[in-house]
Amino acid sequence: MLVKLSLHGLRCKACISAVRSVLEENDAIVIGVTLKSAEFEVPDGDTGKIEKIVREIEELGYDAKIVEIQR
C-alpha cells in the first residue's frame, strides 16, 4: 500500500531525518520525506503498521495525518 502523510512541525533536515528513521525502523519503503509530507509503502493490509508509524511520528512532537492510502 502506498501511504501519503501530511506533516506539520518539521523545521529542518534533522526533523526530516527523524521521520525517515521512524519509517525505516517500521520496515516501510520510503519514497520521500519533506518538511510537509511523507510518502512510503507498507505491505497490503498492514493498516496497524500505518497507525503505529503515525503514533511514533507524533511522539517525536510532530503532527501527522493520513492523506491517502492506495492499495
Image (tube, grey):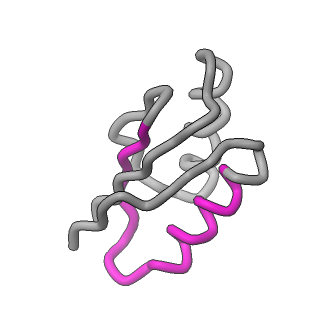
Percent of width and height locating residue 68: 30, 62
Rendered position, 21 above or below 11? below
Query: In which quadrant of the rendered image does the N terminus lie?
Result: bottom left
Does 29 sit left or right of 64 as displayed?
A: left
Percent of width and height locating residue 66: 43, 61
> Which is nearer the eye, 58 or 2?
58
Query: In which quadrant of the rendered image does the C terminus lie?
Result: bottom left
Percent of width and height locating residue 60: 76, 44
Residue 67, located in which quarter of the rendered image? bottom left
> Which is nearer the eye, 56 or 26?
56
Does 47 sit left or right of 63 as displayed?
A: left
Rendered position, 48 above or below 38? below
Q: Which residue is located at x 32 percent, y 77 percent?
A: 44
| Residue that lies at the very extreme toward the top in this rendered image | 12
Does 58 sit left or right of 29 as displayed?
A: right
| Residue that lies at the very extreme toward the bottom in this rendered image | 45
Q: Which residues are magenta?
A: 37-57
Tell me if residue 48 is in the magenta stretch. yes
Q: Which residue is located at x 46 percent, y 78 percent?
A: 47
Residue 13, located in which quarter of the rendered image? top right
Rendered position, 9 above or below 60? above
Q: Which residue is located at x 37 percent, y 83 percent?
A: 45
Q: Which residue is located at x 45 percent, y 33 percent?
A: 36
Percent of width and height locating residue 48: 54, 79
